[in-house]
Image (cartoon, rainbow, N blue to C red):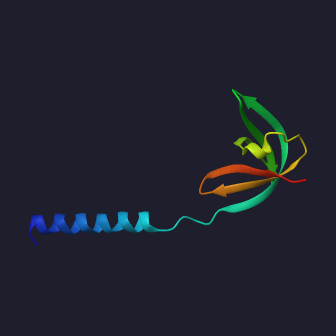
Amino acid sequence: MDHDTYHARDAGARLTQTLVDNLTPPPAPTINYATVTAIRTNNGHTTLTVTYAGTTLTDLPCTTNCTNAKTGDRCLLLTANHLTTIIGILA
């Protein structure tokens, strides 16, 4: 096999792997329950610290529905890929 053919096949294999990696669907988002442990507002942006499954998650962003959260409130966490957002406070 000549040099150019080898490089063309190698480039094709790399392109195929790149396409497969990019076309793989992301995992489905998950929703979990957590408990609010702290509220912080900075320049009008509220972030919450929560406890989930024995772990503390700090400074999570939240929707405008959650800005009136209080310490001890139960909340819903939406995790999509590596991003977690608080999307609701439970009554």
Please identify the quarter of the rendering in which residue 68 is found: top right
Rendered position, 24 above or below 58:
below
Name the residue at 67% across, 56% down: 79
Residue 7 as seen in the image, left or right of residue 27: left
Name the residue at 28% across, 68% down: 13
Please identify the quarter of the rendering in which residue 8 is found: bottom left
Considering depth in this image, is 88 or 7 the residue closer to the camera? 88
Considering depth in this image, is 11 or 23 the residue closer to the camera? 23
Q: Residue furthest front?
A: 65
Name the residue at 77% across, 40% down: 48
Q: Residue furthest left?
A: 2
Please provide percent x and percent y for residue 22. 42, 63
Please identify the quarter of the rendering in which residue 42 is found: top right
Q: Looking at the image, how many numbered discs can be counted on the residues?
A: 0
Residue 57 as seen in the image, left or right of residue 1: right
Q: Residue furthest top?
A: 43
Name the residue at 8% across, 69% down: 2
Please provide percent x and percent y for residue 15. 30, 64
